[in-house]
Each structure stands twice: as C-alpha cells, then as structure tokens.
Image (cartoon, rainbow, N blue to C red):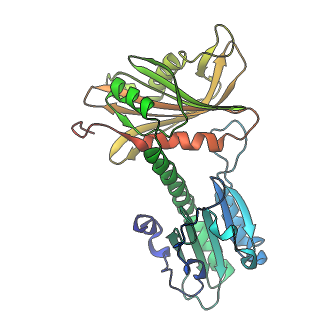
C-alpha cells in the first residue's frame, strides 16, 4: 500500500481520520470483490456529484481511451449515495468515496486495499468544503487515475502468474530467451525463429499479440519510422480474412510515441490503429519495444484488438499489462 500512498505526497490522509468509515471493516471473511474491470463506484452525496467536485472527477475518469477508433472512457463510473453503499456494492473492486466534512482540518486523500473484499482498492478524498474538495481532485486527478490503473494492472499480473498459458510461455522463452507470464486462454497461432503470434478468440472479438525481434543497429532502430517499418514487416505475417490480406499499420494516422521505464528498463511505447490490407478490418494497437543488450536485438511486444461490436478498452488493457510481466535474464544489461 505504501508505494501508492507516496504518489499523493502531502495530499495523503491517514485512514483513521474522521469520515474514513469506509475503511473500518477489513475483509476478513474472504469475500471476492464484485464489478467489471475499469468500473468505479463513486460514493458521495448528490450535491457533491452534481457540483464542481463531481464535474472535476468525471473530467479525469471519463477521459477518452487514447488512440482508440471510437470513444470509450478510461473508466465506467457509477455514482451511489452513501446510504445505498452496502451489500454487493461495498464489495466492488474499485471504490472512490468523496466526503465534505467541516470538521476535517485539511483536505487529503487516503488509499486502502482489500477493505471489504479481495482484490479491492478503496480511496477516500475528503475536504472541509466542496471548493477545497474540487481543488484536491483537480490537483490529484492524474494520480487517482494512475493508482486505479495500477490496481487493475496488479490484478492482471497476479492472475497471469497464478494461471498462465505455460506452453505458450515456453515457446516464447525458447525463441527469445525472455520470460513472459501470459494469462491462460491465449492460443499459439504461429511461430518462427524471430516471431510468435498468439490470440484469445471470442465470438465477436479477437484479443491478440505478437512478439518479434530483429538486430539493433543504433538509436535509429528505436525511432518512430523504424519501429513502424518493423511492425509492418512482422504484422504482415498475420493473415486477414481473405486471400492476400494481412495486417498493417493504418497509414493515415501517425502512431503516438513515447519512451518509458519499467523497473529500470527503457521501453518505447507506440499506440495507433491497425488495418488489413486488401480487406476491411481494423482496430487499436499498442506496442512496446526495448533493446535486449544480451543479444543486441530489438525486442517488441505488439498488442492488438479486433472488436467491431463491443468496446475495445477491456480487451486492450490486459494486453498492455504483458510488458509488466516480461523479464529478461538478470545477466543482461539494461
């Protein structure tokens, strides 16, 4: 819990403060949390929800999922009055409680885990006035999103480690010397010396990823142009529904590009839209590329979703978490 609490800095409040009744009963009865991934229950009075504090919170939680080809909010938000927060609702996986209490001296935010069920995150944001609460949320909105995302990611990682696709993990390790924890349900679709493709097929959607590597030839190998070219080369190995069709990167929109560090390792994240050449299919993708210095090769995890009838967020987000379940040999420099 401490690693999350530090994110908020001076905004943290102890869970024993006045008004923190949501934290009083711990989950000692082993109940399983309820609710869908990326769904948040907000517990507050109607005047808070309809006021500036509620507006500010919705601004952050209902931002659009980036580089999606249709609008989806980061989180589905359900508001519940404090008197109705009981039974199944209080066992929800993601709970955010807003409280205005004149007896509270300083505005602050507290975080607790597994309070009434497992796994669960419960957040309390409280202030003496609605204006102070609004300011608190405005200053910490991005941090709230980050903490909620971390909780969802930890659930995916925990499931992948406990219930993994062992045969698929073995193939990836044999091909690349990399350990990946992959949640069960994924099926190996194709594998060559430098390419592995797997997918999880649903009646109306496809959730897939492909892993590939190629020689690292200097910093230019991690440029947007070079990564897009490499992606198109390997994505062409994924066939479309008709003869001669194959996956490619949608050329009309330049992918978003950023560098990030995960446990000290530098990764390049690229987000965009994929297309199928010679056919009509498409959707969002996100790829993560790094340099495996032990082999002097670029290593990429490329995740994609095809879901023409359903939302794409809940299919793509678990795929994004694969990069957090990837470990290189400890002897390799980072």
Report the residue that reaches farthest toward the left: 331
The image quadrant where one finds the N terminus is bottom left
Q: Which residue is at the far front?
A: 29
Tell me if residue 259 can be seen. Answer: no
Q: Would residue 283 appear left or right of 181 to someone viewing this image?
A: right
Locate residue 294, reporting x and y percent: 25, 30
Viewer-proximal residue among 147 and 64: 147
Residue 323, x across and y down, in percent: 44, 40
- Seen in the picture, residue 24 relative to 79 is either above or below; the reply is below
In the visual, does 1 lie left or right of 264?
A: right
Q: Residue at x 31, y 37 (%)?
A: 328
Residue 79 placement, left or right of 27: right
Expressed as whole percent of the image width and height from the top left, the position of residue 303 reads 54, 33
User: To which quarter of the image does residue 308 belong?
Assistant: top right
Residue 64 visible in image: yes
| Badge count | 0
Residue 37 percent location from the top left of the image: 62, 52
| Residue in the picture at 40% in, 64% down | 3
Picture quadrant where residue 59 is located: bottom right
Q: Is residue 162 above or below residue 207?
A: below
Q: Residue at x 73, y 19 (%)?
A: 280
State the quadrant of the C terminus. Answer: top left
- Note whether 164 is above or below 46 in the view shown: above
Q: Residue at x 36, y 40 (%)?
A: 266
Residue in front for this viewpoint, 274 or 179: 179
**Residue furthest bottom in the image:** 103
Above or below, 37 relative to 71: below
């Amino acid at each position: 819990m401490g690693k999350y609490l530090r994110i908020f800095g001076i905004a943290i409040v102890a869970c024993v403060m006045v008004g923190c009744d949501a934290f009083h009963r711990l989950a000692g009865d082993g109940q399983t949390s309820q609710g869908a991934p990326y769904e948040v229950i907000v517990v507050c009075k109607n005047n808070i929800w309809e006021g500036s504090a509620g507006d500010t919170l919705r601004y952050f939680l209902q931002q659009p999922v980036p580089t999606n080809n249709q609008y989806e909010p980061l989180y589905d938000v359900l508001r519940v009055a404090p008197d109705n927060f009981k039974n199944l609702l209080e066992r929800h996986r993601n709970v955010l409680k807003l409280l205005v209490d004149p007896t509270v001296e300083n505005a602050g935010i507290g975080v607790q885990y597994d309070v009434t069920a497992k796994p669960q995150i419960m957040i309390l944001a409280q202030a003496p006035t609605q204006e102070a609460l609004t300011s608190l949320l405005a200053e910490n909105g991005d941090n709230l999103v980050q903490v909620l995302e971390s909780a969802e990611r930890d659930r995916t990682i925990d499931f992948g480690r406990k219930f993994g696709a062992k045969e698929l993990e073995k193939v990836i390790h044999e091909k690349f010397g990399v350990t990946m924890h992959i949640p069960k349900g994924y099926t190996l679709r194709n594998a060559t010396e430098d390419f592995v493709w797997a997918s999880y097929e649903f009646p109306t959607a496809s959730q897939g990823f492909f892993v590939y590597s190629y020689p690292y030839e200097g910093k230019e190998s991690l440029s947007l142009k070079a990564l897009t070219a490499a992606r198109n080369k390997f994505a062409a190995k994924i066939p479309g529904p008709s003869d001669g069709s194959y996956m490619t990167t949608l050329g009309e929109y330049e992918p978003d590009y950023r560098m990030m560090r995960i446990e000290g390792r530098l990764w390049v994240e690229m987000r965009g839209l994929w297309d199928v050449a010679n056919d009509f299919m498409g959707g969002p993708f996100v790829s993560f590329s790094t340099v495996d210095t032990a082999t002097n090769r670029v290593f990429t995890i490329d995740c994609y979703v095809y879901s023409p009838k359903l939302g794409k967020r809940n299919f793509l987000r678990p795929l994004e978490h694969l990069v957090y379940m990837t470990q290189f040999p400890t002897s390799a420099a980072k």
